[in-house]
Image (tube, rainbow, N blue to C red):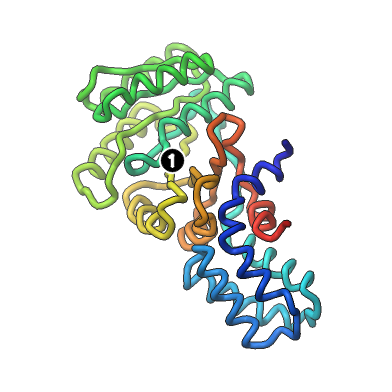
Amino acid sequence: MGFFDKIRNGLKKTKENIGETFDSVLAVFRQVDEELLEELEDALILADIGAQTASETIEELRSLAKRQNIETKEQLTEALCQILAGKMAPNDGLKLDTKPSVILVIGVNGVGKTTTIGKLGQKLTAQGKKVLFAAADTFRAAAADQLTVWADRCGADIVRHSEGADPAAVIFDALTAAKARGTDVVICDTAGRLHNKTNLMNELAKIDRVIQRELPEASRETLLVLDAVTGQNALVQAEQFNQAADLTGLVITKLDGTAKGGVAINVSARLGTPIKFIGVGETADDLLEFDPAQFVQAFFES
């Protein structure tokens, strides 16, 4: 299956949710008037793109339609795709320029952090990089065991402590091991932090201080994992985590299991943070590097 086909299939439920609405709006195409624009705005909101982002998109479409004299359904769809893709921060990939580099993976319970780490590790080891997992989720039962399974599967090293250990101590030991072993990338798992819990956010700051002290010059990625199934609640989580951590990217998981895929556009647009990867299935190959243009086109492709 090709790259675009994976995205299109992964967004099948979202497309089914909004496809009929868009099709009905555009089925009998007439001139681009206010009635048509209002109907399109409603369709965008139904796709979980968010009221503010939908409103801004339609305002840009209104202006573009006048400038370009849009007269066909195809021209309108192309213009809408262009605007929506432009709303999202561009994805320039992971910046892993030092040895070791560090990827810190954060997010609330149940969004798929540990699985995302495993898939990332598999991708990086396939590229010939030496990877080490830091099992700093010491609160969830069997979290380290789950990560160990992924480490064995992809040939990564792992540093883990006993359940209930200090997560910052796990990170410290992992960074020490990485320096000694010539590791290329350390990927740090963390406990599922509720975005409104101050003490857990303080713990995240402690982990950050350890990384800064031990590897001050290292390339750093801080990836927030969000579950697309939660819809607009994902934006609330992202805004809170963005205040507590210097986010460099987002990972949107479980897009294949929801009709709310438009939330990806809204979160990136509102935060100005790039989506680095999207999850559209269970295997490592289903963690896809994000391309805004292809993502939006998949909404409209038949």
Q: Nearer the viewer, residue 32 or 154?
A: 32
Quadrant location of the N terminus in the rendered image = top right
Res 104 → quadrant: top left
Question: Residue 52, relative to residue 19: is it above or below?
Answer: below
| 90 w.r.t. 192: above or below | below
Quadrant where the C terminus lies? Answer: bottom right
Crowd around label 1: few <14 · some 14–19 · many ≥20 (10 Å): many
User: Which residue is located at x 42 percent, y 44 percent?
Assistant: 224
* Dot 1 amino acid type: Thr
Q: For the residue labelled by badge 1, is the local secondary structure a helix, a strand or a loop?
A: strand
Residue 84 pos. (x, y %): 62, 64
Q: In the shown orientation, is residue 203 left or right of residue 91?
A: left
Name the residue tied to disc 1: 222
Residue 289: x and y in percent read 61, 41
Is residue 225 in sight in this rendering?
Answer: yes
Q: Is residue 249 something one can see in this rendering? A: no
What x and y, as percent, mark residue 64?
A: 71, 78
Q: Nearer the viewer, residue 301 or 216?
A: 301
Left or right for 222, reference 208:
right
Residue at left offset 24%, top offset 38%:
203
**Closer to us: 274 or 261:** 261
In this rendering, the answer to whether 207 lies above or below 256 is above
- Residue 9 coordinates in the image, percent (x, y): 64, 45
Residue 208 found in image quarter: top left
* Vertical side of 263 occupied by 5: above or below: above
Q: Residue at x 73, y 38 (%)?
A: 2
